[in-house]
Image (cartoon, helix red, strand yellow):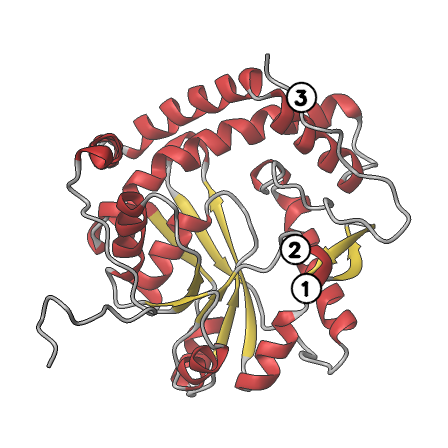
Amino acid sequence: MTTPESTPRPASTPPQPLLWHPRYWPSWFVVGIAYALGRLPFPLLWALGQGLGRLGYRLAPDRCEVARRNLSACLPDTPPAQRERILRAHFGWLGVASLTQSVVWGASRARLKRLVRIRNREFIDSCIAAGRPVIVLVPHFVGLELGGAAFTGLVHAGVYMYQKIRDPVVDRQVMRARRQYGSVSIERSDDLRGLIREVRRGTPFFYLPDQDGGRRGIFVPFCGVPASTVPMLGRFAAMAGAVVIPTFARYLPWGRGLELTFAPPLEPFPTGDQAADAALMNRVIETRIRIMPEQYFWVHRRFKTRPPGEPPFYPPKRRRR
């Protein structure tokens, strides 16, 4: 007979960390600062974020060079001086996004209504009212975290794929924020059949696909450059019988809040051709990049994976002395 002390813990259930252990106190300090910042007026957060981002422009040369290479490849017809202005503005918006993340952690629905303007929501409301499964295509513009909170708080609770953050204290706060309005999270490593069932039940799937797909991606053009692209959007849409609605988050100038805009559903989609579906998705994102280039996530190594035989797209990282 086994006693409670001798009963083995299931291998699939790792021990939970003691979050109040002293080693996590620095993380709790950062979380506390974030919550305090989240109570500040949004225009003040905008100003502080712009200053922080401009500082990052000067102190993060590697990331600057990644963004500069991306802008040169994706906006080749834009004069170099203008691209550099876009780059400086981009870092300003990165700073705004980093500070307004704190708003997401504790925002009430009332505050979200004051901060976020929702455009063209009839595109998604009509699908939800008709009982059609929906995939919300959300490209990596810097306002997507606040836009996601506004979507789940003001439009409809959603389901999203989630990858754990190494710091369990920060991971807990992020999970709590994303679930505060009834959203469902599914681990990236989980069985995707659960995700498809949830979408078929009518929960919109909040999907962010526009990052380097590695060797599992397929090469289709992104702003005219072959880019490893995750081909799952068409497959998800086919499996769930879902309509795909592109959705874009844009910070408004001078701290006036954020605009969340829904676009018409992708048609025809899916086509059954994964390369054609991935290329269409990229073209939709490119169209919005031309409208607000300074707010796209240029510091990501979008072209890290190259077609066989092509040289690296980015220079090696500088060694710190």
On the question of residue 142 being in view, the answer is yes
Residue situated furthest right in the rendering: 309
- The residue under the point 91% across, 49% down is 309
Residue at 49% from the left image edge and 33% from the top image edge: 94
Asked whether disc 3 touches disc 1, contact meaning CB atoms under 8 Å apart, the reply is no
Badge 1 density bin: few <14, some 14–19, many ≥20, Cα 10 Å: many
Few, some or many residues within 10 Å of mark 2 (<14, 14–19, 20+): many
Q: CA distance from mark 3 to mark 2?
A: 31 Å
User: Which class describes the residues within 10 Å of circle 3: few (<14), some (14-19), or many (20+)?
Assistant: few
Task: Name the residue beneath numbered marker 2.
Answer: 285
Type of the residue with mark 1: Met
Residue 306 point in image, percent of width and height: 80, 49
What secondary structure is marked by label 3? loop
Is there CB contact under 8 Å for labels 1 and 2? yes
Dot placed on the residue nearer the N-terminal end, 3 or 1 = 1
Distance (Cα) linking label 3 and label 1? 34 Å
In the image, is residue 218 above or below residue 237?
Answer: above
Label 1, label 2: how far apart the Cα atoms are: 7 Å
Type of the residue with mark 2: Ile
Q: Residue at x 22, y 70 (%)?
A: 8
Q: Give 236 or 306, whichever is nearer the viewer.
A: 306
Q: Please provide percent x and percent y for residue 313.
A: 79, 38
Task: Tell me which corner region of the image, top left, top right, bottom left or bottom right, holds residue 208.
Answer: bottom right
- Quadrant of residue 293 in the image? top right
**Mark 3 lies on residue:** 318
Q: Position of residue 207 (x, y in %)?
A: 51, 64
The amino acid type found where label 3 is placed reads Arg
Which residue does the numbered mark 1 point to in the structure image? 281
